[in-house]
């Protein structure tokens, strides 16, 4: 197991993005079985890197812009649970849905690494990045 603690680097203001926002949706189901979401926007900080670069897939049915980011943070992001939908992270004007979260204590105590996929699938505005 690695013993290098890089938390000082990850928490550095020169490296960390403090403009990230997580949109979290708590889900409740009423007596008739209808589900509703209550959303909240939570600002947080983390290091963002490219997971998969933006690419345009042209298919017979149309085109899809795909891409993903990797967010390393001490904020507990979620890929969803019984009563919570997956978080949506806003980064540089674009929304990314958390697809899965790895708990990486190798970075230092309390860090998670979240893989986030681009939303909407059309890539959003051209000036987003």
Image (cartoon, rainbow, N blue to C red):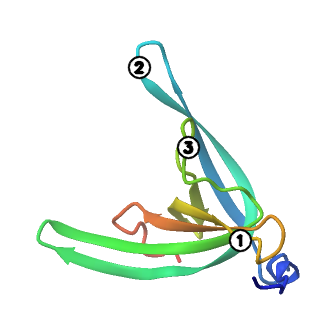
Taking the view exactly as shown, the residue that stands out farthest to the top is 31
Crowding around mark 1 (Cα neighbors within 10 Å: few <14, some 14 to 19, many 20+) is some
> According to the image, label 3 marks what residue?
81
Crowding around mark 2 (Cα neighbors within 10 Å: few <14, some 14 to 19, many 20+) is few
- Select label 2 or label 1 by which is in front: 1
Q: Is residue 13 visible?
A: no
Instruction: Estimate the spatial distance between the alpha carbons at disc 3 and disc 2, rounded to whole Å.
Output: 18 Å
Q: Pinpoint residue 46: horizontal percent, then vertical percent.
A: 73, 70
Query: In terms of sequence position, does the residue under pointer 2 or pointer 1 come before the other?
Result: 2
Q: In the rendered view, would you say 65 is above or below 101?
A: below
Q: Residue at x 54, y 61 (%)?
A: 100
Q: Residue at x 49, y 28 (%)?
A: 36
Q: Residue at x 41, y 13 (%)?
A: 32
In the image, 106 versus 88, the foreground residue is 106
Instruction: Estimate the spatial distance between the alpha carbons at disc 1 and disc 3, rounded to whole Å.
Output: 20 Å
Instruction: Estimate the spatial distance between the alpha carbons at disc 2 and disc 1, rounded to whole Å.
Output: 37 Å
> According to the image, label 1 marks what residue?
104
Query: In terms of sequence position, does the residue under pointer 1 or pointer 3 come before the other?
Result: 3
Q: Pinpoint residue 117: horizontal percent, then vertical percent.
A: 47, 66
Residue 40 location, quadrant? top right
Q: Is residue 125 left or right of residue 7?
A: left
> According to the image, label 2 marks what residue?
33
Q: Pinpoint residue 114: horizontal percent, then vertical percent.
A: 60, 66
Q: Is residue 65 left or right of residue 82?
A: left
Taking the view exactly as shown, the residue that stands out farthest to the right is 8
Query: In terms of sequence position, does the residue under pointer 3 or pointer 2 come before the other?
Result: 2
Q: Is residue 75 left or right of residue 66?
A: right
């Amino acid at each position: 197991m690695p013993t290098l603690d890089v938390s000082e680097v990850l928490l550095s203001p020169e490296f960390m993005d403090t403009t990230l926002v997580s949109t979290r949706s708590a889900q409740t189901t009423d007596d008739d079985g209808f589900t509703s979401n209550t959303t909240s926007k939570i600002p947080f900080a983390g290091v963002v890197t490219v997971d998969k670069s933006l690419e345009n897939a042209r298919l017979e049915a149309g085109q899809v812009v795909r891409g993903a980011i990797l967010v390393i943070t001490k904020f507990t992001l979620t890929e969803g649970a019984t009563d919570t939908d997956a978080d949506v992270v806003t980064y540089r004007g674009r929304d990314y849905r958390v697809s899965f979260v790895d708990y990486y204590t190798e970075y230092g105590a309390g860090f998670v690494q979240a893989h986030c996929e681009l939303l909407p699938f059309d890539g959003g505005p051209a000036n987003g990045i």
